[in-house]
Image (tube, grey):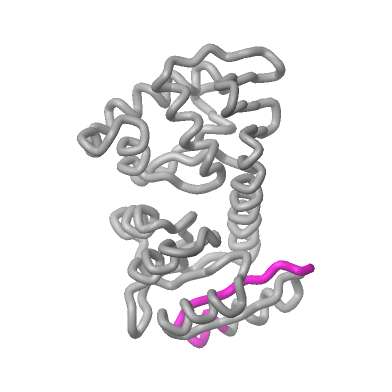
Amino acid sequence: MSRSILAIDDEPQMLRFLRNSLASTEYRFFEAATGEAGIAATMSHRPDVILLDLGLPDLDGIEVTRRLREWTETPIIVLSARGQEQDKVAALDAGADDYLTKPFSLPELLARVRVAERHADQQNENKDDVFTLADLRVDFARRIVTLAGEEVRLTPIEYKLLTTLARKAGKVLTYQQLLKEVWGPRYATQRQYLHVYMGHLRSKLERVPARPRFLVTEPGVGYRLKLE
């Protein structure tokens, strides 16, 4: 079956652009012009990816994200004219998977959609407790990490950081999300810990740590284990 996309946006021009652009793709397209209608459409259509504007007439997009995350893990890509880092962080902390600032091109949007789909598929595969990406393999059950078939020795913190990113592969995780998950809530503002250990991980997993292919930085926001 073809996959579907739901756009929750009150801008007629944006909805027209998405509707016309996606008509030539394999995706079925649904739309909603308010937050409440978008939540209802998510329940009825069960889309594979949600495109969500932050500036809706009834609910803020961040509130819509929080409400959706109470019952669904459907990937959410925020589309907004708000380009400041605090808006990106707030949306991601609320549970969004990715963020695109308007205006954007169709190829860029489709690339983000594919990553979001792979993230969702990878989450389902992770139920088998093994994560694979290129020549990187994480066996959650055995707590073994291999690169090109060779075991990589990681400290407990390095392993926790990697597995946190792997279980959410393709999704941007903010600094605060990672610090809370790996070190605990008391360390939510201690970014230096995260930067140091990310450097350790890159030195062990990346061929060229200064140009990472797996562990990429989202400037001012956080990190992502890249799927493509």
Q: In the figure, 88 relative to 176: above or below? A: below
Magenta span includes 6:
yes
Q: In the image, 7: left or right of 189?
A: right
Q: In the figure, 196 relative to 106: above or below? A: above
Instruction: State how many labels appear.
Output: 0
x and y, in percent, of residue 164 in the image: 46, 36
Q: Residue at x 51, y 33 (%)?
A: 215
Q: In the image, 110: left or right of 181?
A: right
Q: Residue at x 50, y 63 (%)?
A: 72
Q: Residue at x 44, y 67 (%)?
A: 68
Q: In the figure, 10 relative to 126: above or below? A: below
Residue 90: image quadrant is bottom left
Magenta span includes 62:
no
Residue range of the region highlighted in magenta in the rendering: 1-15
x and y, in percent, of residue 2 in the image: 76, 69
Residue 223: image quadrant is top left
Residue 86: image quadrant is bottom left
Q: Is 160 or 210 nearer to us in this picture?
A: 160
Q: In the figure, 88 relative to 149: above or below? A: below
x and y, in percent, of residue 112 in the image: 59, 56
x and y, in percent, of residue 178 in the image: 37, 38
Q: Given the current orientation, which residue lies at the most extreme right position?
A: 1
Position of the N terminus, as image quadrant, is bottom right
Position of the C terminus, as image quadrant, is top right
Q: Is 141 or 105 nearer to us in this picture?
A: 141
